[in-house]
Amino acid sequence: MEQYKKEFIEFMVESDVLKFGEFTLKSGRKSPFFMNAGAYVTGSQLKRLGEYYAKAIYDNYGDDFDVLFGPAYKGIPLAVATAVAFYELYGKEIRYCSNRKEVKDHGDVGILLGSDIRDKERIVIIEDVTTSGKSIEETFPILRAQGDVEIVGLMVSLNRMERGRNTDRSALDEIRETYGFPTAAIVTMGDVVECLYNKECQGKVVIDDAIKEAIDRYFEQYGAVR
């Protein structure tokens, strides 16, 4: 596992973004782990978060793209922080763009916030975590409406590695198969377990035998077929 991935996993725990215990998801599933990207709230956290995203995007998609698109609302700070980090790490100017939930009809009109997207441009979509693909259903037509654009890929922070409600495939696999562009994550839950199981993080063991057993049971029931 790359060093930045190990650091990112510890960063999620340190930032109280990745938690372990018992959590009820929107799907109704009882999960032994939960991620809340809304817990990244400080300048230093957003700086580091942008750097991890930038490194993962560079590793998976290189730097031959024009725009980082962050779906509203959580994708907006992700796109901004990552565009800044991409320039600092790789010296490449990448523009950021997002959508508005409501189309603005005065001043800076339209559905887009940030940069315009022009015909023939290459786009990387950036999100926190994808469990259903619903946001891509909303995002994809918006991007296509801007012209003959190419979606280079989707990057999320964590692949939960669980199947959707009506399929045996993971949300990332479904998106790739449905829309025809690559998908990737900074880390997977498999990486998280490998990194944290019976190892100290922030002075304590966050995945002990009991949590590991709960995660294994969860994936026996809900794990995605690859």
Image (spheres, rainbow, N blue to C red):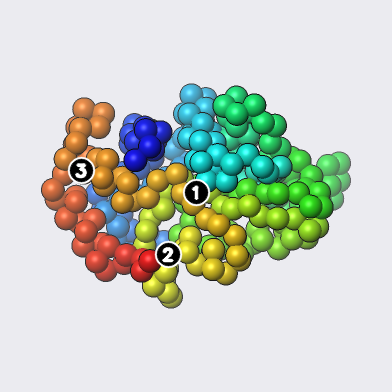
The residue beneath circle 2 is 170
- According to the picture, the residue beneath numbered tag 1 turns out to be 156
Decide: marks 1, 2 in contact (CB < 8 A)? Answer: no
**Residue shown at 80% from the left, 57% from the top:** 147
Q: Is residue 132 visible?
A: no
Question: Residue lying furthest left in this view?
Answer: 209
Q: Earlier in the sequence, mark 3 or mark 1?
A: 1
Q: Nearer the viewer, residue 222 or 119?
A: 119
* Nearest to the observer: residue 9 or residue 111: 9
Q: Which mark is residue 197?
A: 3
Q: Amino acid at mark 3?
A: Tyr
Q: Nearer the viewer, residue 128 or 226?
A: 226
Q: Which mark is residue 146?
A: none
What secondary structure is found at the residue carrying circle 2? loop
Q: Residue at x 60, y 32 (%)?
A: 86
Q: Is residue 15 above or below residue 185?
A: above
**Residue at 71% over, 49% down:** 122
Quarter of the rendering containing residue 139: bottom right
Between the residue at mark 3 and the residue at mark 1, the CA separation in whole angstroms equals 23 Å
Q: Earlier in the sequence, mark 3 or mark 2?
A: 2
